[in-house]
Image (spheres, rainbow, N blue to C red):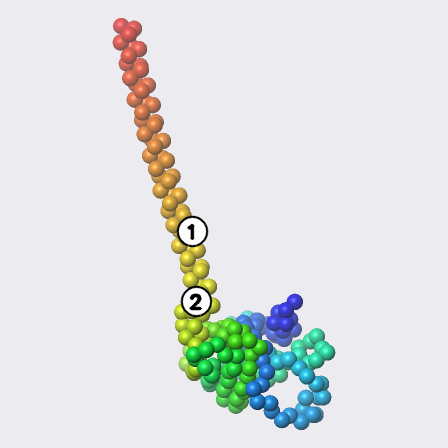
Amino acid sequence: MSAKAAINKEIFAPHDERMLGAVQVKRRTKKKIPFLATGGQGEYLTYICLSVTNKKPSQASITKVKQFEGSTSFVRRSQWMLEQLCQVNGIDSNRDSPEFDLLFENAFDQWVASTASEKSTFFQILHHTCQRYLTDKKPEFINCQSKIMGGNSILHSAADSVTSAVQKASQALNERGERLGRAEEKTEDMKNSAQQFAETAHKLAMKHKC
């Protein structure tokens, strides 16, 4: 089981939530945290997770999840409602970059994703989720590549693939219908020809008998 699947199972599923996406991160600037504040648990992996409740009306949230060294379990840390997200900063709109910032109403974090592509995927899901679940107040996306905001996103690509598949299936059915139609016409013509032949043969037989 992948780390993200395990996070969804351990952290979100028990609370009747489902994880939409996650990105593994490290801080760009380390905060000075007292030893006692971390419980002395040493190194850890951090994931920024996006989730939504299964119960209607759906509520989306962003959660910081940690996995401490030597442990197979995950721990829920800070959490914000999606409405509290004020700004998403992609740092550089001209190139693939793993760095990004998240500004909330009461917090600001500077992150580096494990890879630029993982950050891009998370941003696309985050942008789509904001458009879907937020009606009044939506966060500002700045310094983001156009593929995150527009038609080149994985979400649009998936929709395009589905549309293309439907169109191909429809075209195949139409072509099949046309072939069936032509076959029916040929069958009808053969039936008429056979009937005409039978009538002609009958007339010739009667004439010969006379």
Q: Position of residue 203 (x, y in %)?
A: 28, 14
In the image shown, does 69 or 10 lie closer to the viewer? Answer: 69
In the rendered image, is residue 126 in sight? no
- Per the rendering, the mark at residue 156 is 2
Q: Amino acid at mark 1?
A: Ala
Q: Is residue 150 above or below residue 101?
A: above
Say left or right for 21 vs 144. Answer: right
Q: Residue at x 31, y 25 (%)?
A: 193
Q: Residue at x 41, y 52 (%)?
A: 168
Q: Earlier in the sequence, mark 1 or mark 2?
A: 2
Q: Secondary structure at mark 1?
A: helix
Q: Residue at x 30, y 22 (%)?
A: 196
Say left or right for 3 vs 102. Answer: right
Q: Amino acid at mark 2?
A: His
Q: Position of residue 118 (x, y in %)?
A: 54, 74
Quarter that holds the N terminus: bottom right
Determine crowd level at label 2: few under 14, some 14-19, many 20+ residues with C-alpha closer than 10 A: some
Q: Position of residue 166 (x, y in %)?
A: 42, 55
Q: Secondary structure at mark 2?
A: helix
Q: Residue at x 40, y 47 (%)?
A: 173
Quarter that holds the C terminus: top left
Determine crowd level at label 1: few under 14, some 14-19, many 20+ residues with C-alpha closer than 10 A: few
- What is the distance, in whole Å, between disc 1 and disc 2 at their CAs? 20 Å
- Per the rendering, the mark at residue 169 is 1
Q: Residue furthest front?
A: 95
Say left or right for 115 vs 181. Answer: right
The quadrant in which residue 34 appears is bottom right
